[in-house]
Amino acid sequence: MMRIEQAITNYSSGSLLTIWQQNFIDWTASNGVFSYILLTCNLLPLFLFGMVTARKRWLHEVEHHKVLIQKIWFVSLIIFIVVKAGVYFWDNHTWLSMFQDTIGGSASAIFYLTSITLLFQKSPFTRLLKPFTYVGKMSLSNYIFQSVSCFILFYGVGFGLYNTINPVGSLMIVLVIYLCQVVLSRWYMTYYRFGPIEWVWRRLMYMEKLPNKRQPK
């Protein structure tokens, strides 16, 4: 109990070095050799699945691959429900918790991806979902934006709100940050082809000049 209270204190009011030290302690405490093996066995198939998806153009030519996407949607839904509900039927064992986070997390991500893809093909949802496409086009930049924003909000080097926000308050923060990202992403993509970090990443990958600013029409 004292360790938990110390961790809360370190995160909410500690210095940057203290936060990093506590983060390292928490990481080593919750991750062992088994978790690294499980993580590797989980990430490698995801990379391969992403490569196959891009090569086969499943998400580029949705109507042509609609039946296959619907099958993937159904299978991922079943795995998502069974694995995520497992802790409520067989107790929250450590191995089951790891299985839930890795396999269940991946299944839920694929389920959400295919659900949005299929919904986007229906005209009532196309206009509703369109603003979120700008966020996806600069997803890495938005991921870093979320991380920095929450670091400033919750940790002691910023506002120190760690362990002080109830679930409703957390949901409100999520909505505000994400809506800001939707607005900013739409504005940014009006003038640029890639997100700022996506552009840097591509420059480093291809090692050649890569124009980013859109030409005025």
Image (tube, helix red, strand yellow):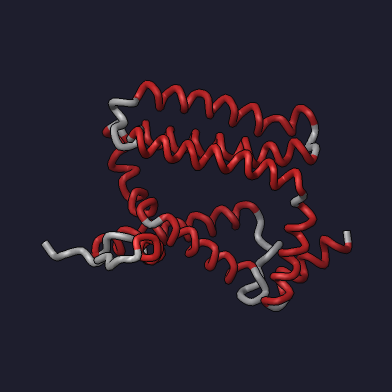
Q: Position of residue 159 (x, y in %)?
A: 62, 74
Lateral position of residue 30 relative to residue 132, left or right: right
Vertical side of 198 occupied by 63: above or below: above
Vertical side of 89 occupied by 97: above or below: below
Q: Is residue 119 visible?
A: no
Image-quadrant location for residue 203: bottom left
Where is the C terminus found, in terms of image quarters?
Answer: bottom left
The number of numbered discs placed on residues in the rendered structure image is: 0
Q: Where is residue 141 in the image (x, y as percent from the top left)?
A: 43, 62
Residue at x 49% of width, y 36% of height:
110
Residue at x 77% of width, y 63% of height:
25
Where is the N terminus found, in terms of image quarters?
Answer: bottom right
Vertical side of 72 occupied by 154: above or below: below
Relative depth, front residue between 146 and 32:
32
Image-quadrant location for residue 66: top left
Lateral position of residue 116 relative to residue 41, left or right: left
Relative depth, front residue between 58 and 96:
58
Image-quadrant location for residue 90: top right
Q: Position of residue 23 (x, y in %)?
A: 71, 64
Residue most extreme to the front? 207
Q: Can residue 148 be seen in this view?
A: yes
Q: Position of residue 213 (x, y in %)?
A: 23, 67
Vertical side of 171 occupied by 59: above or below: above
